[in-house]
């Protein structure tokens, strides 16, 4: 806004005296300054005032009458001289004034013109001539604006000038946008006034215009800047205000107005915080402002809480700084309140989340660590500290090699980390580490940690001590093996039990069958006896038939006898006997058949065998049976060895089938009787069936299949064992073990 | 020569018939067979046998019961008795295969007829000798075959 008010009077002719000159100079200088100067608004006001005052002086002078007092000739001559002198003086003064005017016209960097009432140029200055592009101001005399400018502009100027001529009203301080003759578009400040003759009649117009493009542009820039600043502070979410020292609001931004619930920003101007805030806040704020005024110290980042709306406690940060004038005097306070509630909550949440995360990590029994790609620890948890007995300050920044005594382990850890970093994939493995010289097994999961760009920047490890689990696994494995073994033992025992049960059943069955079979056998025997007596002696076929039938009956009787032996061998009459003697008796019974079968007999019976509780008759039966069996195993002859010796029992498998209290146990003193033959041995396939009743490998009619079953039954009734095995050197060994 | 009366008590009619036939054919015997053991006492009292051949395993009264009945009857208490049963085998320790158990002679039913016959004759002789000396009757003992 240009404060140009040079109420220029009509400068209509020469003036006398220094005052008018000085006044003219002031007007000129002031106007010049106004036009070309670059001072601030206040200095422009001052300049304008100067111009105004000088013009007033000139106007006053015009109204003053000339001095006019002479009488005689002398006085006339004197008067004449005086007049002449005065004329000279006036002429000089006039000439001087002309000079001033010429200087002014020639040098003022504004366009000055004088026009007649038809708006034809009477006179222009040099600047004007130059501006419209003519060499001399003279060249413009008689021309009009229509000769120089576009019609639009020329018409407008003409209309203005006609109006001035008609009304005598000046047009002052008109700022117009114009197309300059040199083609540029700019702003022009124009003052147009009526041009009057000495009598005050309007004889034309005159004016002065100057290029104020820079000034106007600067003004526009300033306005734009101010608007920008205003929209800027309005756009700010922070609450911004400026107050005078009495706390009246001078400026507030939109956010501030909305915050306190004002209808508009303008409403707040002139109000104080007391109009919007609770007393407590107002008092505290006032005290703070007072302190600021006293000390001049700003308030920076003061945090405070405010509950403007009930239940909505908000958190603010306030900054206030003093406003000072050019002289440094404080005249107000500018401040900014920032609502940081959300940030604060987010921050608290983040802090809490981090604390929780840290707590979780620290309280985890796992060993957790994070290392950068160079293997330096970035983060460890308490479990890690405890494991290595180090504080995290002694761990962070160091590598595995620097903190782990177990160099091999450290090397492996580093290799695994690098593997994870290279592959970019997690890795799970068992890692071994000696802790206090005790090997520990850790189940480790290693995984890459990536930054926002997906670049791997660290490797994380979570390791769980599974030493106990491993031990438990081994224990379970062992237990499983034991269980499997126990299961096998049980199975075997069960088989033995089943076998024993089978034997018992067979025994009971045998007794019943024996009786029932023997009755018809007896009857048939009786019948054959009767019929045999009726067969003629010369009927040999009938005689043979009777004999065959008798043999059949004998065979049946033998089988039945075996069954009965097996089933009736339940009670023994035991007495201490010298086994060598019992064996000797048995041998006596088989010596003859052995010799017949060309079997050589070797005996090894020491004299000092301990006495054994036996039923001698039954044991003899067993021995005879075993020796006859051995003999049958050597149809082409061979050697039969019978020996007996005392020993201590070892390495027996507990036979669950034996249900007697007196069965043999590990470490018992025993006497062992062995009957070895040199026959063909027992087919492995037959081993398990050897003691089954009716099992026989002999041709039908040759054996009853009850011999060994009965033998074993008898030996077991002695709480002993009867075993048959193939000898490595060939043949079979039958061994009886009896408790000594 | 006076015939010797023998009473056979056995539940097997086929067997008793054949034994009777064999005995009467080879010796001077008068044999009566009883297949229902409950009739044994009456038959014996009526028949007055010199020797009774008694089976052990019989339905109703078994051989032991019959012997006890006889021993309790004064008229029969001195009658010779031979237990002929399939329960025992021939005893290898005696020449005639007889087994003495509980004061009674046991002979295997499946023994050859000759063996059985010799046992019968032996006990008849013993009995006749004893009767001549008026030996007191042996006390009844329980027996058990385990």
Image (cartoon, coloured by chain):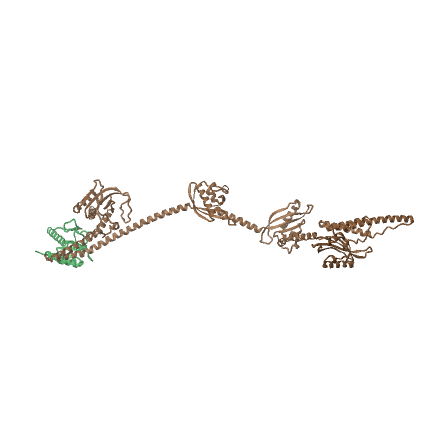
Chain colours: A brown, B green
Could one spot residue B145 in this view of the protein?
Answer: no
Residue A433 point in image, percent of width and height: 43, 43
Quadrant that contains the C terminus of chain A: top left
Could one spot residue A689 in this view of the protein?
Answer: yes
Residue B91 point in image, percent of width and height: 17, 50
**Is A495 placed left or right of A339 in the picture?**
left
**Residue drawn at point x = 37 percent, y = 47 percent:** A477
Closer to us: A728 or A392:
A728
Closer to us: A313 or B1:
A313
Residue A67 point in image, percent of width and height: 86, 50
Closer to us: A600 or A62:
A62
Check the image and name the residue furthest to the left: B1
**Is B140 placed left or right of A275 in the picture?**
left
Residue A683 point in image, percent of width and height: 25, 49
Marker count (numbered): 0
Closer to us: A515 or A652:
A652
Say which quarter of the image contains residue A575.
Answer: top left
**Is A591 placed left or right of A260 in the picture?**
left
**Is B51 placed left or right of A421 in the picture?**
left
């Amino acid at each position: 806004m240009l404060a140009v008010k040079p109420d220029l009077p009509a400068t209509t002719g020469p003036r006398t005296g220094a005052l008018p000159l000085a006044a003219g100079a002031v007007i000129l200088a002031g106007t010049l300054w106004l036009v070309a100067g670059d001072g601030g608004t206040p200095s422009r006001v001052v300049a304008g005032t100067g111009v105004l005052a000088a013009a007033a002086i000139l106007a006053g002078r015009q109204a003053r009458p000339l001095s006019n007092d002479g009488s005689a000739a002398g006085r006339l001559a004197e008067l004449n001289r005086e007049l002449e002198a005065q004329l000279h003086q006036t002429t000089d003064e006039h000439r001087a004034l002309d000079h001033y005017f010429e200087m002014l016209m020639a040098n003022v960097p504004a366009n000055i013109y004088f026009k007649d009432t038809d708006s034809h140029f009477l006179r222009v200055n040099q600047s004007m001539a130059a501006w419209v592009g003519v060499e001399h101001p003279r060249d413009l005399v008689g021309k009009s604006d229509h000769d120089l400018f576009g019609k639009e502009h020329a018409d407008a100027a003409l209309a203005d000038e006609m109006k001035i001529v008609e009304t005598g009203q000046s047009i002052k301080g008109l700022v117009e946008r114009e197309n300059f003759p040199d083609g540029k578009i700019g702003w022009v400040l124009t003052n147009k006034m009526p041009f009057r003759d000495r009598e005050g009649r309007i004889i034309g117009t005159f004016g002065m215009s100057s290029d104020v493009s820079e000034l106007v542009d600067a003004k526009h820039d300033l306005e734009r800047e101010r608007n920008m600043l205003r929209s800027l502070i309005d756009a700010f979410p922070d609450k911004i205000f400026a107050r005078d020292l009495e706390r009246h609001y001078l400026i507030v931004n939109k956010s501030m107005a909305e915050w306190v619930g004002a209808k508009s920003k303008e409403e707040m101007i002139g109000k104080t915080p007391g109009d919007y805030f609770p007393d407590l806040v107002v008092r505290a704020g006032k005290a703070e402002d007072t302190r600021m005024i006293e000390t001049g110290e700003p308030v920076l980042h003061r945090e405070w809480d405010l509950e403007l709306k009930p239940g909505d406690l908000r958190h603010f940060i306030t900054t206030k700084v003093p406003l000072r004038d050019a002289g440094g005097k404080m005249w107000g306070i500018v401040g900014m309140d920032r609502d940081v509630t959300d940030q604060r909550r987010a921050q608290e949440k983040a802090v809490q989340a981090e604390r929780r995360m840290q707590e979780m990590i620290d309280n985890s029994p796992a060993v957790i660590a994070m290392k950068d790609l160079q293997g330096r620890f970035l983060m460890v948890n308490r479990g890690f500290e405890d494991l290595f007995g180090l504080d995290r300050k002694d761990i962070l920044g160091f590598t595995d090699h620097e903190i782990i005594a177990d160099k091999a382990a450290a090397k492996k850890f580093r290799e695994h980390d690098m593997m994870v970093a290279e592959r970019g994939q997690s890795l799970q493995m068992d890692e071994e580490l000696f802790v206090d010289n005790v090997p520990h097994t850790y189940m480790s999961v290693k995984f890459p940690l990536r930054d926002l760009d997906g670049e791997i920047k660290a490797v994380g490890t979570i390791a769980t001590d599974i030493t106990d689990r491993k031990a438990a696994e081994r224990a379970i494995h062992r237990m499983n093996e034991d269980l499997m073994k126990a299961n096998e033992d049980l199975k075997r025992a069960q088989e033995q039990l089943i076998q024993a049960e089978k034997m018992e059943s067979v025994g009971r069955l045998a007794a019943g069958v024996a009786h029932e079979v023997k009755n018809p056998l007896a009857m048939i025997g009786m019948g054959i006896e009767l019929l045999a007596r009726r067969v003629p002696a010369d009927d040999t076929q009938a005689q043979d038939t009777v004999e065959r039938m008798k043999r059949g009956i004998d065979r049946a009787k033998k089988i039945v006898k075996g069954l009965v032996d097996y089933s009736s061998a339940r009670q023994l009459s035991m007495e201490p006997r010298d086994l060598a003697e019992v064996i000797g008796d048995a041998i006596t019974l088989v010596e003859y058949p052995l010799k017949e079968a060309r079997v050589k007999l070797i005996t090894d019976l020491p004299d000092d065998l301990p006495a054994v509780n036996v039923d001698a008759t039954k044991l003899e039966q067993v021995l005879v049976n075993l020796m006859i069996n051995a003999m049958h195993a050597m149809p082409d002859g061979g050697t039969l060895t019978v020996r007996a010796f005392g020993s201590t029992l070892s390495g027996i498998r507990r036979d669950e089938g034996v249900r007697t209290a007196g069965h043999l146990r590990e470490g018992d003193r025993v006497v062992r009787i062995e009957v070895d033959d040199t026959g063909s041995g027992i087919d492995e396939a037959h081993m398990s069936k050897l003691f089954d009743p009716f099992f026989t490998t002999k041709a039908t009619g040759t054996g009853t299949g009850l011999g060994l079953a009965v033998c074993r039954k008898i030996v077991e009734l002695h709480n002993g064992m009867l075993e048959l095995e193939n000898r490595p050197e060939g043949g079979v060994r039958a061994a009886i073990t009896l408790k000594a | 020569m006076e015939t010797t009366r023998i009473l056979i008590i056995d539940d097997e009619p086929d067997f008793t018939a054949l034994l009777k036939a064999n005995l009467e054919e080879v010796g001077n015997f008068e044999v009566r067979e009883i297949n229902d053991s409950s009739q044994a006492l009456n038959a014996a009292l009526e028949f007055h046998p010199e020797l009774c051949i008694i089976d052990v395993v019989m339905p109703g009264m078994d051989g032991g019961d019959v012997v006890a009945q006889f021993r309790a009857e004064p008229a029969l208490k001195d009658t010779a008795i031979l237990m002929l049963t399939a329960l025992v085998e021939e005893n290898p320790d005696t020449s005639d295969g007889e087994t003495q158990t509980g004061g009674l002679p046991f002979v295997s039913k499946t023994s050859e007829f000759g063996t059985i016959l010799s046992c019968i004759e032996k006990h008849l002789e013993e009995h006749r000798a004893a009767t001549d000396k008026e030996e007191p009757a042996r006390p009844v003992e329980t027996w058990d075959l385990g």
